[in-house]
Image: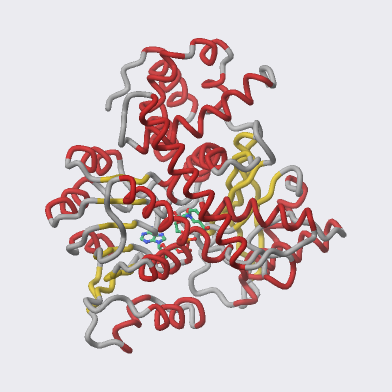
């Protein structure tokens, strides 16, 4: 699909001029615009109310200095970001990413996508995202704590349980959320649900750790079911070896698939017998080491340098769960050539536009990130609810609700893809379904 609608082309042109050097943000906006074309043609009232122009401009962008002292007594300085993208349907909500590649373009693309994703969950959450170019790799626990405290010493004044509720993302798990929460509580003198992904002893939700990976598999299973298939008996390739990858691997295996790979930014492991997840959890969650360690304990498995090689492994289903643009056109062609017939995205925007073209050209089933990985934020929404009620649901209760939400997300994608004449195009379905609710809310609230 190409962008041909003159109005959307002119808005995109303005976005490009206003945001030079932000390729990821432009990529995310372009993808959404392409799929919104039929909506714009059908709904002139939306054009007239300026929803589109407002949607692509964040409500607020905060950039700040994060100074901290390393273990050698040296002052280090990082840059912190919080982009509060859209609060039409609820308080800003979205994770914090700690990775050296973080810049404004990446935080903006994530915040933009988050707005649609949160809308799809059916819960009242607006879109936001934050992060820093801090690299957690190789840092001591004390350094991580000092960084997180300094980060929150600025961020605290911009967030709140009814204003903006951050969570984890790449490089931010329960440990980092705990340090940030502790610092927020200390500065504000208030114990409140201002972050999600918290530890279970201080307001965290059971099943939040598992939620994105499990949700991805629930969504994938729904998509497969609608097309007469299931995960049972399928060979699955997963990239990444972090939170999303590990729990996608766990649930896919439980649903009867065989997961044969995991990766990190250095390389990938291939285990023809199926990944030993107990071993992976020990290496990644307990020892915090690289995935290459796997073959020391499981010599029958293989380790290959270079993370892109993971897409050359023969499989039925690919679940990219590492990072943006990790799967390019060439990799998508390699997947298709090897018989892969389904891609569902655990990571945010892992497929380049060329890769997505290849999925459609080769008739693959494609579950886009905004829908397929929405289980994480949905469960964060459930954590907010539990915090407000001062109650904790059981693992089974949360998991059941997550399953229900993922089913309803798939249904919305399917229904909207059909309503707008693109049956089976779940990317269009997800974008339109997410957009409609936000657009109606923005229209109703006037030009703010
Ligand atoms: P983690 O930090 O737990 O893990 C990230 C994984 O991706 C690591 O294996 C990491 O390898 C790999 N990775 C990161 N950057 C690169 C890169 N440039 N090239 C190759 N591999 C890379 O993060 P999560 O699992 O939480 O997040 C993974 C993806 O899922 C992200 O896109 C995130 O935005 C998305 N997501 C996460 C949610 C959540 O609840 N956590 C919710 C929805 C989406 P290495 O250690 O070498 O860096």
* Image spot of residue 365 (x, y percent): 27, 45
Q: Is residue 122 left or right of residue 420?
A: right
Say left or right for 210 vs 194: left
Tell me the quarter of the image containing the C terminus: top right
Horizontal and vertical percent for residue 388?
Answer: 78, 53
Furthest-left residue in this view: 337
Which of the image's four quarters has the N terminus? Answer: top left
Query: Residue 193, located in which quarter of the rendered image?
Result: bottom right
Task: Say if 442 sits above or below 403 in the image.
Answer: above
Percent across and percent down for residue 162 are 76, 44
Is residue 22 something that shows in the picture?
no
**Residue at the image point whose x is 32% and y is 46% from the top:** 351
Q: Give 94 or 288, whichever is nearer the viewer.
A: 94
- Residue that lies at the very extreme toward the front in this rendered image: 228
- Residue located at (59% from left, 23% from top): 440
Q: Is 158 left, or right, of 381 in this rendering?
A: right
Q: Is residue 260 above or below residue 283?
A: above
Total numbered labels placed on residues in the image? 0
Q: Can you say whether 120 is above or below 185 in the image?
A: above
Residue 207 position by quadrant: bottom right
Residue placed most toward the observer, 335 or 81: 335
Indicate the quadrant of ligand 1 in the picture: bottom left
Q: Is residue 47 visible?
A: yes
Q: How is the image coloured?
A: secondary structure
Q: Is residue 157 above or below residue 26?
A: below
The residue that appears at 45% across and 30% down in the rendered structure is 432
Residue 133: x, y in percent?
53, 56
Nearer-the-camera pick, 142 or 425: 425
Identify the residue at horizontal 43%, vertical 14% (top origin): 42
In the figure, is residue 270 to the left or right of 374? Answer: left
């Amino acid at each position: 699909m190409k962008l041909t609608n003159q109005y959307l082309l002119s808005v995109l042109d303005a976005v490009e001029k206003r945001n030079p050097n932000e390729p990821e943000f432009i990529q995310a906006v372009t993808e959404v615009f392409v799929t919104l074309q039929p909506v714009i043609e059908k709904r002139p009232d939306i054009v007239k109310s300026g929803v589109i122009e407002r949607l692509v401009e964040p409500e607020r962008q905060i950039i700040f200095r994060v100074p901290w002292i390393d273990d050698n007594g040296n002052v280090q300085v990082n840059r912190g970001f919080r982009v509060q993208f859209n609060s039409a349907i609820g308080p800003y909500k979205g994770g914090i990413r700690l990775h050296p590649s973080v810049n404004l373009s990446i935080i903006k693309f994530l915040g933009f996508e988050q707005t649609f994703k949160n809308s799809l969950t059916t819960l009242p959450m607006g879109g936001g995202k934050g992060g820093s170019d801090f690299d957690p790799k190789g840092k001591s626990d004390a350094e991580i704590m000092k960084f997180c405290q300094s980060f929150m010493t600025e961020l605290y004044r911009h967030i709140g349980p009814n204003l903006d509720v951050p969570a984890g993302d790449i490089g931010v798990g329960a440990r980092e959320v705990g340090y940030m929460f502790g610092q927020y509580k200390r500065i504000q003198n208030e114990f409140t649900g201002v972050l999600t992904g918290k530890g279970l002893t201080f307001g965290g939700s059971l099943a939040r750790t598992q939620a994105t990976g499990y949700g991805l598999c629930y969504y994938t299973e729904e998509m497969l079911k609608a097309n007469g298939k299931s995960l049972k008996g399928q060979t699955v390739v997963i990239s990444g070896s972090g939170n999303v990858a590990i729990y996608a691997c766990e649930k896919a295996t439980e649903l009867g698939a065989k997961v044969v790979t995991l990766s990190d930014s250095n390389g990938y492991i291939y285990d023809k017998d199926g990944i030993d997840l107990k071993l992976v959890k020990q290496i990644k969650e307990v020892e915090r080491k690289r995935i290459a360690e796997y073959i020391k304990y499981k010599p029958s498995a293989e380790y290959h340098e270079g993370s892109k090689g993971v897409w050359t492994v023969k499989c039925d289903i690919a679940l990219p769960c590492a990072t943006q643009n990790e799967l390019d056109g060439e990799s998508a062609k390699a997947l298709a050539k090897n018989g892969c017939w389904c891609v569902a995205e655990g990571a945010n925007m892992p497929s380049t536009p060329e890769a997505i073209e290849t999925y459609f050209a080769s008739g693959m089933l494609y579950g886009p990130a905004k829908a397929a990985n929405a289980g994480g934020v949905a469960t964060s929404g459930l954590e907010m609810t539990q915090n407000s009620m001062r109650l904790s649901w059981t693992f089974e209760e949360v998991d059941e609700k997550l399953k229900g939400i993922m089913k309803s997300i798939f249904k919305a994608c399917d229904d909207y893809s059909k309503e707008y004449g693109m049956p089976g195009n779940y990317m269009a379905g997800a974008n339109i379904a997410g957009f409609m609710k936000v657009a109606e809310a923005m229209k109703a609230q006037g030009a703010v």
